[in-house]
Every structure is written in structure tokens, then in C-alpha cells.
Image (tube, rainbow, N blue to C red):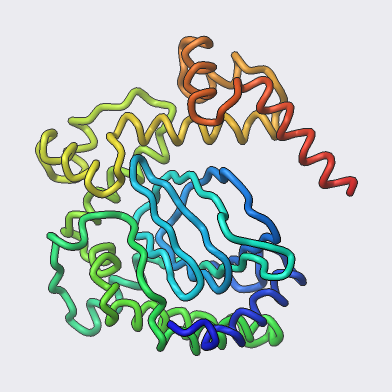
Amino acid sequence: MDESNLDTLKTRALSLWRAHGRETPLPGVFLAAADAPFGPIHGVYEPSLCAVLQGAKISRVGDRSYCYDAGKCLITSLDVPVRAEIIEASSARPYIALVVNVDPADVAGLLLDHAQTEVDNATSSTALGVHPLPADLVDPLERLLALADRPGDIPVLAPMIRREIVWRLLNSPQGAILRQTGLADSRLARIGRSIAWVREHFTDTLSVPHLAALAGMSPATFHRHFKAATAMTPVQFQKSLRLQEARRLLLSEGSDVAQIGFAIGYESPSQFSREYRRMFGAPPGRDGAEIRRMVASETHA
């Protein structure tokens, strides 16, 4: 897509971000901006559309990397832990991106209403994909952001515009991944059921046979399709969730490293510290102190 086609949307998004930050007045709509390269950023992506309007970002899931710049979008169909970096941003041309969460129930409703049930499993087995932003999405995205100036319209019009966005995505060349999220018996939807269980019970001992039963697959088939979708084994996926939760607890609840390790499911403090350092580049005590220092610095800036 010609970047000039994004100018109005980019200007509106940047203005909205300056007024509200990441959290917009629009449910399920988020903005990200930066005036310098930044990262790594650890988090869990939910089913969503992330459109980069200026700058560039790289997101890593397991051993896969997804790079997307202005005019491209990342479509995510499952909850996946991600390590990301903003790799192109400056004060003159800040990175700016728009994220719209996608409710699988909306996908299912549109598929049911319009009987679009054919899915190519061979080409849509991964949880993430980078694509050109469909040109016919620019207008509804702009109309969606414009509702922030008319709060009274948001409850009525925002759901309608978000439904339009999902509809256009489903009917674009990029729609195969999202179609799977709305089909109860599709491969990704079944993997999604197991992921939902892991997210809710990430401190429990992980049982691949149990997860496979939730997905309606044999353990071997489940393991293969889980890794194809997420670029991680189930154990690696759970470990990533645990360590991200540990980092959140270090920020919000203090520096008792051993207690936090036990709270997220580690029986060995040394194993927890070793795996935390491998993921975040510093042991938990030092990393937690640095995060709190940075937050305090930003608060008093």
C-alpha cells in the first residue's frame, strides 16, 4: 500500500495517542507509538489486527520472526507470548501502530450468517501472519478512531464498524487464519482451546495428554500442530507465560524472588532464576529492581 494512503489515519492515530496513550476510549482498540527504537517488549498477543502506520516492528514467537512496517499488518489468531522490538522510529517520524482486538465470537457469527466455512488448513496453520494492510480497511479504521471525538456514538457505532473490519478481513486474501478461529472444529480453534486452559492454569503441572484431549487430538498430533501454530512446544509456551507473570509480580509486589518463583509454579529457586535470566537477560532480582527504577523515573519525569 502507498504510504500516502495512510496519512489521514496515521495523523488521527498519533493525535489520539497523544491524548489518551495506549488505552483509547474505544473498547478493544489500542495505540502504540515511540520516537526511538525500543525493546525487547514481552507480552501476550491476543487475536487481533495490528496495523503499522509508520516505522517498523519485529515480533518473535518461538524461533519465528515477523517484521512489519508502514502499510503492513500482523494478524494474530491465537493467544501467544511474544518478544517484540520497535526497530524503526525517530522524533521526526515516530513509530505508530493501531491494534484492534478480534473476538472469535464475531468471526463465528459472520461465518454462520454467511455460510463461509471453507478453510485451507495447509496454508493457515500458524497463529501469526504478516500481510499488506487491505486498502478497504483504511476507511473503516479511520471511522472507528473518529468515534473517539463523539463518545455518545461509541456504544452504537463502534461494534458495527468493528464487525465491518472483521468482515473485510475475512474476505481478504489474509482471511484464512481468522476464519479458522471462528470454526469450532478447525485445527487452530482446537489448539486455541488448549491454549486457553494453559493460560488459566499456567502454574499447574502441564499434561500433554490432557491438552491433547481438550483439542480432540492424539498427543503426537497435538504436539505437532501446537508447535506449528505457536512455534513452541506446550512446555515452552507455559514457561514463557510463567516468566512473564513473574516479571509482572516483580514490578507490582516487590522483590521476594523465591516467593514469586514458587507462586508461578517453580519448585527450585535456582531453576527459576536461571530460566528468568535466559529469557530477560538478567536475574530476577536485578531485573525487577531495574524495572521499578525505570517506572519511578518515568513517574517523576
Q: Position of residue 150 (x, y in %)?
A: 69, 87
Numbered disc total: 0
Q: Position of residue 233 (x, y in %)?
A: 27, 34
Q: Quick one: 17 or 96, which is closer to the camera?
A: 96
Residue at (55%, 87%) from the top-left corner? 4
With 270 as the anchor, is 221 left or right in this view? left
Picture quadrant where residue 293 is located = top right
Residue at (63%, 31%) from the top-left corner? 249
With 209 as the anchor, is 53 left or right in this view? right
Vertical comparison of 100 with 8: above or below: above
Residue at (39%, 55%) from the top-left corner? 66
Vertical comparison of 116 with 185: above or below: below
Vertical comparison of 104 with 155: above or below: above
> Is residue 141 among what the camera can see?
yes
Vertical comparison of 87 with 224: above or below: below
Q: Position of residue 127 (x, y in %)?
A: 31, 55
Query: In which quadrant will I find the N terminus?
Result: bottom left
Q: Quick one: 53 or 99, which is closer to the camera?
A: 53
> Is residue 100 among what the camera can see?
no
With 154 as the anchor, is 105 left or right in this view? left
Q: Quick one: 41 or 106, which is closer to the camera?
A: 41
Q: Position of residue 87 (x, y in %)?
A: 56, 55
Picture quadrant where residue 31 is located = bottom right
Residue at (30%, 46%) from the top-left corner? 230
